[in-house]
Amino acid sequence: MSELRTTLVQCDLRWEDPDANCRMLEETLGELDGDQTDLIVLPEMFATGFTMNSREMAEPMDESPTVAWLRNQAVQRGCVVTGSVAVVEGGDCFNRLVWARPDGSLVTYDKRHLFRMAGEHERYAMGHERVIVELKGFRILLSVCYDLRFPVWLRQQPAPGEHFEYDALLCIANWPAPRRHPWRVLLQARAVENLCPVIGVNRVGEDAKGLGYAGDSMLVDAKGEALIDEPRDLPFVKTGTLSLADLQAFREKFPAWRDADHFTLSDGVGD
């Protein structure tokens, strides 16, 4: 059975300075490559911080230097590299998670739930599609920050005749320190209710508005127990391994999925 080596990159971000952030991340990652990891996970808006200056900072998707950098890192390191980028496409700005593969191909997910308390819903367009990617035998559901608070959006929705839709949930964030407790609890809750590991990567430091970030990046197993947990507001790069065999054994031993409620997810989101 497959194993997925997952590297969490918890870092401080330079405000609205993509070049500086990309240089910092290259130095932080050092010689890390596909001999050591399968997946490198960067925080939400790793190039700019959680900027609401979308019209000034969002890069054209097909000409984005940051997206090109992400692709190049994946190719050069020989592993998947992912994080979200402020991009503009079709006249709309998106907080877009980019999943860059080592063959140079990209998969994208546009953040569905926009953080209205910061006015994100006024500056970025909402995504409409759930996206699942595959890596080393794991099917991984992609999500960004505020999505974590909405369990229906992230709930397993297996097709008829199947038991599970995905095998791991990934959530990248710029989640402020005053709400660090919900972040930690929700990462574990999403793991428990969906019987799957959760990969959660958050930033540290302080942004230009004086808002602090405590990190608390975690790799959580399907029982909600932490495999990686660094409850300190310091940068780190740490790799943990997920086992598909262990996951399947747990799901067979504790088949709560057999009693799950079936539902249909509508396209609408409240005003």
Image (cartoon, rainbow, N blue to C red):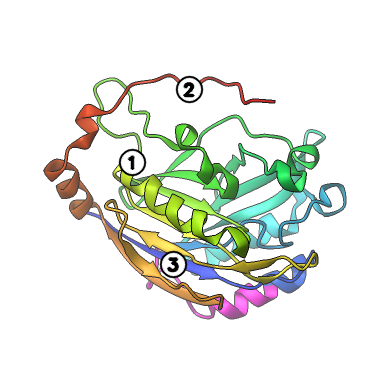
SS for callout 2? loop
Q: Which residue is mark 2?
A: 265
**What crowding class fits label 3: few (fewer than 14 Cα within 10 Å), some (14-19), or many (20 or more)?**
many
Q: Are marks 2 and 1 in contact (CB under 8 Å)?
A: no
Three-letter code, disc 1: Glu
Q: Magenta residues?
A: 23-38
Instruction: Tell me the number on the disc at residue 264.
Output: none
Q: Residue at x 38, y 48 (%)?
A: 189
- On whether residue 169 falls in the magenta region, the answer is no
* Position above or below: 242 against 267: below
Instruction: Mark 2 or mark 1: name the one nearer the start of the chain.
Output: 1
Residue 62 position, x and y percent, is 73, 45
Residue 103 appears in the rendering: no
Q: Farthest residue toward the right?
A: 56
* Position above or below: 215 against 110: below
Instruction: Tell me the number on the disc at residue 7.
Output: 3
| Front tag of 1 and 3 | 1
Three-letter code, disc 2: Leu
Q: Are marks 3 and 2 in contact (CB under 8 Å)?
A: no
Q: Farthest residue toward the left?
A: 253
* Position above or below: 221 against 144: below
Residue 89 position, x and y percent, is 76, 38
Q: Which residue is mark 1?
A: 193
Three-letter code, disc 3: Thr
Whether residue 186 sits left or right of residue 69 in the image: it is left
| Front tag of 3 and 2 | 2
- Across the whole image, how many numbered discs are drawn on residues? 3
Residue 32 position, x and y percent, is 47, 75
SS for callout 1? helix
How much space separates mark 2 and mark 1, taking CA atoms? 17 Å
Q: Residue at x 22, y 28 (%)?
A: 259
